[in-house]
Image (cartoon, rainbow, N blue to C red):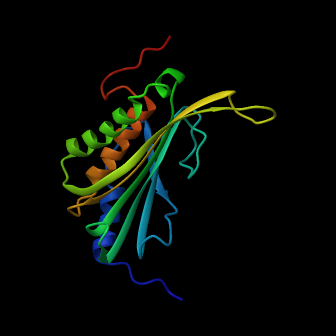
Amino acid sequence: MTNPPEPARFAAAVAAMKAATVRSEIEVAPIRPPQRLAPHSFALGAEVLHDESEGVPEESEGDAFGRLILLYDPNGDEAWHGTTRLVAYIQADVDASLAADPLLPDVAWSWLVDALEAHGEPLTALGGTVTATSSVRFGDIAGPPRAHQLELRASWTPRSDVLGPHVEAFCDVLAYAAGLPPIGVARLRS
């Protein structure tokens, strides 16, 4: 069985995503997309770089990583309100005090909304969840005794074929979740 030919609109969307400009502290690269969610799909993995970073794995033990998935159905999808859907997933380690803050989910969601608005591309049907978790390890389980994560899952339908700004907004949210300073501001080291 052969794959259906790639529609020109989907190919252009993929090219636009690959051409996005993101912060130097974030590495973005194609990863294997989900195969059964739409006739055509493409995915980018993103990870906040550290000195020891090597590549962009689909699953990471780094402190902030994510995936942005492009789904395309030329026949459209009623739930999407269009033919194209972007699905975002971000996970970041956070400190205990931040994880315990009851406003963290609201703040993290506002990062996404504000970043999408700041990049100015129209969208519709934005929805998602934000989860803050704290884990305690017992026995012979590897890893820190206590860990705290922020997880954001969201999806939206872009109203234009200009997808680079959506990738840039996604990476802005990843930077916020990782605690990177604003561009042009240096982090003080102790």
Q: Is residue 168 above or below residue 76?
A: above
- Determine the residue positioned at 25% across, 67% down: 81
**Residue 107, image x, y percentages:** 34, 32
Taking the image as shown, residue 137 lies to the left or right of residue 90, namely right
Residue 115 found in image quarter = top left
**Residue 12, image x, y percentages:** 29, 68
Q: Is residue 107 above or below residue 86?
A: above
Taking the image as shown, residue 55 lies to the left or right of residue 175, namely right
Taking the image as shown, residue 119 lies to the left or right of residue 132, namely left
**Residue 139, image x, y percentages:** 80, 32
Q: Nearer the viewer, residue 81 or 30?
A: 81
- Determine the residue positioned at 35% across, 46% down: 170
Q: Visible in this render: residue 21?
A: no
Taking the image as shown, residue 121 lies to the left or right of residue 145, namely left
Residue 102 found in image quarter = top left
- Determine the residue positioned at 18% across, 48% down: 120
**Residue 101, image x, y percentages:** 44, 25
Residue, far right: 140
Q: How many marks on residues?
A: 0
Q: Nearer the viewer, residue 118 or 187?
A: 118
Q: Nearer the viewer, residue 138 or 186?
A: 138
- Determine the residue positioned at 23% across, 57% down: 124
Residue, far bottom: 1
Q: Is residue 79 above or below residue 129?
A: below
Q: Visible in this render: residue 133?
A: yes
Quadrant into which the N terminus falls: bottom right
